[in-house]
Image (spheres, helix red, strand yellow):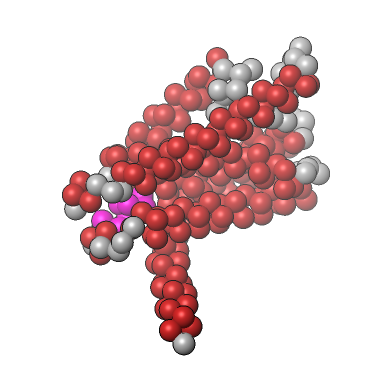
């Protein structure tokens, strides 16, 4: 009997956590990032169709990275700021193991929802632009999206201000775009396009570089998240 009551209480708390975090993820400003993502997608797609450029998997991969970054930018950058503005951060810190019970749920929700949105965008690309491997392309796009999203989460726990974190991430993003030309043929290129093989480079060599790049980004994302969760232990720095 007690176990049944505990299970009911757990699921009630779990549903409330999801409901609150959904409000944070889909805050009043999130819709503008969704609209910006869709506007960017259609603008670039229509422009390239009008110019008769080649529409293939490599193009669609590059087309969808920016919308993915826009979708994950708001919840990862402004999540803690929204908690502070709502006056709920102190209550959340009162929950034992706050960083695990609240933020891990939020991070999971953000990652899953953004992936589903990108999967929908890939399906749209399949029917509107060119036949592509829907699941594979969506998964590949999520590597840089998760990497930069996890980095934004980490910086949000350090800076503790949404606008400040946004400025830092924009500067880092511009810097990484500039460096992408230098690291184009290496595993260190955050914006590496696995579907676009550079000229005069063996396909097997490129596949190995792309695999190492994905491992690097996956490990980097995990380290960013763990460091951000570790920062959330410093209650006095947030309140």
Task: Tell which of 227 and 115 is nearer to you.
Answer: 227
Residue lying at 47% horizontally and 77% vertically, measured from the top left: 7
Q: Is residue 74 above or below residue 179?
A: below
Residue 180 position, x and y percent, is 55, 21
Give yes or no for residue 181 being in the magenta stretch: no
Q: Quadrant of residue 58?
A: top right
Q: Quadrant of residue 91?
A: bottom left
Q: Main secondary structure of the magenta part?
A: helix
Residue 213 position, x and y percent, is 61, 28
Q: Is residue 34 above or below residue 209?
A: below
Task: Tell which of 220 and 147 is nearer to you.
Answer: 220
Kindly give the residue lying farthest to the bottom in the view shown.
1
Is residue 163 visible to the viewer in this orientation of the structure? no
Give yes or no for residue 80 being in the magenta stretch: yes
Residue lying at 28% horizontally and 40% vertically, measured from the top left: 159
| Residue 195 placement, left or right of 177 | right
Task: State the count of labels.
Answer: 0
Residue lying at 61% horizontally and 33% vertically, measured from the top left: 214
Kindly give the residue lying farthest to the right in the view shown.
131
Task: Tell which of 66 and 46 is nearer to you.
Answer: 66
| Residue 34 placement, left or right of 199 | left
Residue lying at 66% horizontally and 51% vertically, measured from the top left: 119
Q: Is residue 151 above or below residue 196?
A: below
Residue 82 position, x and y percent, is 32, 56
Residue 195 position, x and y percent, is 72, 30
* Range covered by the magenta-colored residues: 77-84
Kindly give the residue lying farthest to the top in the view shown.
200
Is residue 15 visible to the viewer in this orientation of the structure? yes
């Amino acid at each position: 009997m007690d176990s049944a009551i505990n299970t009911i209480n757990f699921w009630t708390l779990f549903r409330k956590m999801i409901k609150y975090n959904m409000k944070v993820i889909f805050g009043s400003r999130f819709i503008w990032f969704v609209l910006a993502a869709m506007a960017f997608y259609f603008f670039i797609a229509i422009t390239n169709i009008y110019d008769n450029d080649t529409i293939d998997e490599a193009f669609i991969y590059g087309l969808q990275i920016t919308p993915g970054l826009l979708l994950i930018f708001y919840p990862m950058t402004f999540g803690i700021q929204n908690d502070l503005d709502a006056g709920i951060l102190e209550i959340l810190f009162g929950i034992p193991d706050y960083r695990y019970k609240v933020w891990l749920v939020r991070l999971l929700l953000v990652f899953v929802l953004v992936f589903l949105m990108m999967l929908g965008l890939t399906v749209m690309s399949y029917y509107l632009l060119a036949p592509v491997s829907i699941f594979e392309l969506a998964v590949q796009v999520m590597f840089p999206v998760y990497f930069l999203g996890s980095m934004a989460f980490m910086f949000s726990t350090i800076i503790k201000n949404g606008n400040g974190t946004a400025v830092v991430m924009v500067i880092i993003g511009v810097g990484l775009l500039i460096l992408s030309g230098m690291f184009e043929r290496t595993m260190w290129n955050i914006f590496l396009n696995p579907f676009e093989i550079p000229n005069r480079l063996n396909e097997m060599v490129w596949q190995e570089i792309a695999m190492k790049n994905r491992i690097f980004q996956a490990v980097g994302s995990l380290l960013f998240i763990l460091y951000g969760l570790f920062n959330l232990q410093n209650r006095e720095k947030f309140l």
